[in-house]
Image: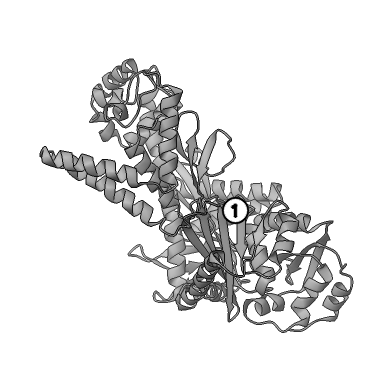
Amino acid sequence: MVLTESLKRQIALLPDRPGVYQMKDVNDRIIYVGKAKNLKRRVSQYFLRPQTGKVLAMVNHVDHFDFIQVHTDQEAFILEMNLIQSLHPRYNIMLMDDSHYPYIAIRKSDAFLKIARRADDKHYFYFGPFPNSRDAFTIIDLLNRIYPTRKCKTLGKKPCLYAHLGQCLAPCVNEISPETYQDLYNKIKAFLDGNTAPVIKEYAEKMEQASEAMRYEDAESYKETIDAIKRVTAKQAVELQSDRTNRDVFAYAERDGYLALSILTFRNGLLLGKKVRVVPSFEGGASQATELIEEYYQNNDLPSEILCNIEGMAEEFTSVYPSAKVFSPKEGRLLSQIDMAALNARQGLDNHFQSARLTDDNEAILESLGKLLGIDTPYRIELFDNSHLQGSNPVGAMVCYINGEPVKGMYRKFHLDPKNAGDDYHSMVEVVTRRYRRLKEENLSYPDLILTDGGLPQVHATLEALAAVGVNIPVFGLYKNDRHETEGIIDKDEKTYPLDRQSPLFFYLMRMQDEVHRFAISFHRSERIKSMHASIFDGVPGIGEKRKELLRKNYPTLDALKNASLEELKQILPAASAEALKQKIDTL
């Protein structure tokens, strides 16, 4: 690590003020974005202190840096997050993705249940969030089975199947009193608060009665419900009997250049789940752990309390989130929750070092790819594929990988011009033109490498499109052998780069190729289903876009729709619409 005269001069000009700094490489590409309370002190630490691992690798790539001065720590935090999300610097590692953990939401007026990603509607009571999304969906399915909740967002004019099964109060035809809804609401809320004993007792009695009456199928169904309740509540076994506080508990641990942050999510005193993230230790210690937690709450709601083992976090964190209540207990049962989080953080480090899927492996693979092709290490790669069936419903797809990992939020789908259907060359020209014209118009960053799932023609098509747009990006194709197996990489001059089929690079490229193929095929399939049904549903009275989507969901193929009985269709459609649709189907 060499501190050049140029860097010394830049450091000397830094203010002792809050701000955001951008580390740049020799190509003026931003490779790291960070925030600081004191820009001069923070940035100089990178170059004046001994560094190891990822931090050393980042510093060695820094040719110069830029900074933006702001008024407060909170402004610095917001600016840093915006820059990271828009620029995707290769050395930045976010704690979480941009999704929100799900809540179970109960409408207070009628006990209607749904999954929500934000707890911001005063008409609902929210239970969660659930770090494991599957748990939320499992619980809401169970609640809908146990309680006669309303299942339809829009009420029909006659009872549905759930009403006949006793799983809905049928507000579509019955007038439900506020007292009935309140009782249902209270029961569901009690269940979510952990009071499941009355429900288990009720179903145990039903199971015994059904067994005595030799209704063994009913008895088995009741037993399955009891088992499901026990499985769900087993995940909520860690509970403070007298403490119903909504609380997030954080702890961190460090080892060999990596930092692990553990999050335990308690709601109403119940431990709903944990999340552990292991990242390279850039600044290290309490400072980096605090920044990771700040990033976490940009996409998640603040709980009533935050517990942590991070010295000095409360002051720094509340400068960004003034309403937060942060505590670091030194004794008692709350300290035991922090100890539990710390144990999970240390275990996260153990798992990380034992895993073969280290970030370093991805970096080594990307470096080897760059050396093989004679280009800079391609930290951001975009891969294209097109799909059609005998020229029908032509679509294009693009997947994006950054730092060796898929970034699904940057995947793109393209409806192609029907005149290019079956013409792979001009389909590729169309897709690539549209993709990079938009990036250029919106002044967004480009990938380091474009790969096409095809040979030389696709490479030439891509280059033709880039030339038309006025963009210069390295382009290579994945070519196949006579057995239609991917064999290597080809460039515009027909130079081939055969791949060792046992090498990590080969398997990495195959995963990318499989992913773009999967993405393109799934998009094409969904479009084909829509077009296949379109002519059948069009013109049938009473079938609008919402009912079309519901029909496609229940009958994904034309054969399934043909085999549907009139009674089944009447469960989804008004009687007149169902009869008209059935008559139209029978003429096919």
- Left or right: residue 1 compared with residue 434: right
- Left or right: residue 578 compared with residue 93: left
* Percent of width and height locating residue 50: 72, 84
Residue in the image at 51% along x and 46% along y: 413
Against 165, residue 354 (above or below) is below
Please tell me in which quadrant of the rendered image residue 564 appears. Answer: top left
Q: Outermost residue, left direction?
A: 214
Numbered disc 1: secondary structure:
helix
Quadrant the C terminus occupies: top left
* Percent of width and height locating residue 328: 64, 66
* Percent of width and height locating residue 21: 77, 65
Please tell me in which quadrant of the rendered image residue 63 appears. Answer: bottom right
Residue in the image at 66% along x and 74% along y: 285
The residue nearer to you, when weighing 163 against 582, is 163
Q: Amino acid at mark 1?
A: Glu
Quadrant the N terminus occupies: bottom right
Residue in the image at 49% along x and 47% along y: 396
* Res. 94 visible in picture: no
Question: In this figure, which residue is indicated by the disc labeled 1?
Answer: 464
- Left or right: residue 550 compared with residue 292: left
Against 330, residue 80 (above or below) is above
Decide: few, some or many residues near mark 1? Use Cα within 10 Å; few <14, some 14-19, many ≥20.
some
Against 272, residue 526 (above or below) is above
- Say how the picture is coloured: one colour
* Percent of width and height locating residue 461: 54, 53
* Res. 244 visible in picture: yes
Against 13, residue 136 (above or below) is above
The residue nearer to you, when weighing 225 against 532, is 225
Residue in the image at 44% along x and 25% along y: 179
